[in-house]
Image: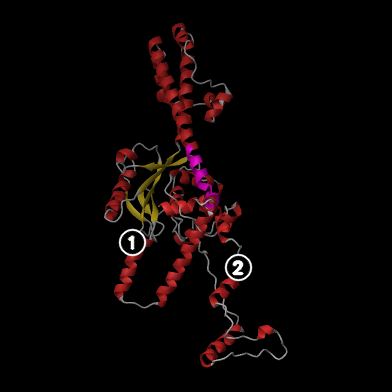
């Protein structure tokens, strides 16, 4: 595997003239030419003969670079070695992330953001958007970035909008998340993000982006998914980009050549990019970290049921704009975490049942029917409530809405009405418990997916292939293929 960094230190100043004299004299000489050593030296290395093989200057430079950089003997083993937490923290780059909701949820959790979940949408239809839990804090759209597309100018006046420009490669996922959560109303950010938002509130958008790029806390969380090979690839891409830039500056070509080169770069080199959509100050905004200014899409009218009605046509327009050249798009939504809502539903249903029982405690018929039913949830058993992260006091202090209390009071006027309402409340409680458990299973699956992504199997796979080669299995496969 090629090294990600190539170092070619200059030759020793004392060696260069001597080498040049040897080359010039070799064209004229037909016999051995001896170069005298300094008078005080009698070392045999002070003579050089054209009949002796000369060392390759490039090999000499490579050996000198190896010694200077203190490279290990086996670079492949070093490249496959798993990263440590210190390696991740000290690395200044940002790794490219897949558009995976589980990864985004882990990033938000580790940043300290609470009660928010990233969900993937499989359709841009409003009917899909309407199924999301409210409030919807923002949307993230993934598409292949093409800088030649005319985006238009952004807005100078942005009010209370928080926006940061992306100032480093491969960081657009975290920048899109930050551009949403920093603008979300009523969202608990955690100590680190809250302090960062306060410290950067008076900065311009570029300086905010620069602060994010250099923030070890955010960068380490983003890079928690990286493997050593990701580091090497990112460093190599950066090195190649620098080399290409230097080559282009050194070359002079026709306008046609430059245009063709630019077209190739757009088609081949630019990867996928995340942008965000958020509602702020009565408007819907498109926040693209690679654009200098945020773009205001439209005003949220008083008759709008959800701000996504305004963002959806903009996203659809982007899809139509790129549909001839690409078919890969992805849409994610940031909304309230469902597990919190399900826990509240459990408390509300159980508290309603308790209130109805209190109203009907003197009705023998109702009491007899209820006693025959096994309890769905023992609200006085802390061990049983621990599954839902609840305590008995949560039910004792539960505050029911006036509408629900009135409904219970009306039903308590007769045994039949009370029994019908009781059965409905039991169903509501069972549904809430089922939804809570389903969400916890989903979270467990996501956590396992994150753990698998963070594991580095490169070294194990390399050893396995080595053993196959030693046993002759690979040679056999090559011959039979």
- The magenta stretch spans which residues? 445-466
Q: Mark 1 Cα within 10 Å, few/some/many (few <14, many 20+)?
A: few
Q: Residue furthest bottom?
A: 28
Q: Earlier in the sequence, mark 2 or mark 1?
A: 2
| Front position in the image: 326 or 402 | 326
List x then y, in percent, for residue 365.
44, 6
Residue at 48% in and 42% down: 449
Asked which quadrant contains residue 385, the reply is: top right
Residue at 41% in and 51% down: 480
| Front position in the image: 291 or 301 | 291
Numbered badge on residue 259 = none
List x then y, in percent, for residue 101.
43, 44
Asked which quadrant contains residue 17, the reply is: bottom right
Magenta-drawn stretch contains 453? yes
Name the residue beneath numbered marker 1.
267
Q: Is residue 199 visible?
A: no
Q: Mark 2 Cα within 10 Å, few/some/many (few <14, many 20+)?
A: few
Q: How far apart are labels 2 and 1 at the CA level?
A: 37 Å
Residue at 38% in and 62% down: 269
List x then y, in percent, for residue 327.
31, 51
Is 186 rendered above or below residue 37?
above
Report the colour scheme: secondary structure
Numbered badge on residue 69 = 2
Q: Residue furthest right?
A: 40
Secondary element at tag 2: helix
Q: Residue furthest top?
A: 364
| Front position in the image: 195 or 3 | 3
Secondary element at tag 1: helix
Q: Is residue 54 left or right of residue 179?
A: right
Q: Is residue 288 left or right of residue 73?
A: left
Q: Main secondary structure of the magenta part?
A: helix
């Amino acid at each position: 595997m090629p090294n990600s960094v190539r170092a070619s230190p200059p030759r020793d100043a004392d060696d260069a003239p001597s080498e040049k004299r040897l080359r010039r004299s070799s064209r004229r000489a037909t016999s051995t030419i001896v170069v005298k050593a300094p008078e005080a030296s009698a070392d045999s290395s002070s003579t050089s003969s054209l009949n002796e093989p000369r060392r390759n200057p490039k090999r000499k430079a490579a050996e000198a670079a190896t010694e200077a950089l203190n490279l290990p003997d086996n670079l492949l083993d070093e490249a496959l070695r798993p990263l440590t937490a210190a390696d991740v923290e000290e690395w200044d780059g940002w790794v490219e992330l897949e558009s995976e909701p589980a990864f985004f949820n882990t990033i938000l959790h580790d940043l300290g953001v609470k009660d928010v979940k990233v969900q993937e949408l499989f359709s841009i239809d409003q009917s899909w958007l309407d199924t999301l839990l409210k409030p919807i804090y923002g949307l993230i759209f993934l598409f292949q970035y093409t800088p030649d597309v005319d985006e238009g100018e952004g807005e100078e006046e942005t009010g209370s909008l928080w926006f940061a420009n992306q100032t480093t490669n491969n960081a657009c996922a975290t920048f899109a998340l930050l551009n949403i959560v920093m603008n979300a109303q009523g969202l608990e950010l955690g100590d680190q993000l809250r302090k960062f938002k306060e410290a950067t509130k008076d900065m311009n958008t570029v300086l905010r982006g620069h602060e994010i790029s250099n923030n070890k806390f955010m960068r380490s969380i983003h890079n928690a998914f990286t493997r050593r090979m990701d580091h090497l690839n990112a460093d190599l891409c950066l090195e190649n980009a620098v080399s290409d830039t230097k080559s282009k500056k050194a070359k002079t070509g026709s306008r046609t050549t430059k245009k063709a080169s630019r077209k190739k770069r757009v088609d081949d080199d630019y990867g996928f990019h995340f942008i965000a959509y958020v509602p702020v100050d009565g408007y819907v905004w498109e926040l693209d970290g690679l654009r200098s200014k945020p773009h205001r899409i439209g005003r949220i009218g008083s008759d709008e049921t959800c701000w996504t009605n305004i963002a959806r046509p903009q996203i659809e327009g982007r899809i139509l704009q790129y549909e001839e050249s690409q078919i890969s798009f992805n849409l994610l939504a940031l909304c309230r975490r469902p597990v919190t809502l399900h826990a509240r539903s459990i408390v509300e249903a159980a508290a309603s049942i308790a209130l109805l029982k209190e109203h009907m405690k003197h009705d023998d018929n109702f009491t007899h029917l209820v006693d025959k039913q096994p309890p769905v949830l023992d609200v006085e058993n802390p061990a049983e409530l621990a599954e839902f992260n609840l305590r008995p006091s949560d039910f004792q202090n539960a505050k029911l809405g006036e509408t629900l209390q009135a409904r219970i009071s009306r039903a308590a006027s007769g045994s039949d009405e009370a029994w019908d309402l009781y059965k409905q409340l039991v169903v509501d409680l069972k549904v809430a418990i089922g939804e809570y458990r389903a969400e916890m299973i989903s979270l467990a699956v996501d956590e396992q997916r994150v753990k698998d992504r963070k594991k580095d199997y490169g070294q194990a796979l390399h050893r396995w292939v080595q053993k196959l080669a030693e046993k002759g299995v690979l040679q056999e496969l090559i011959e039979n293929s």
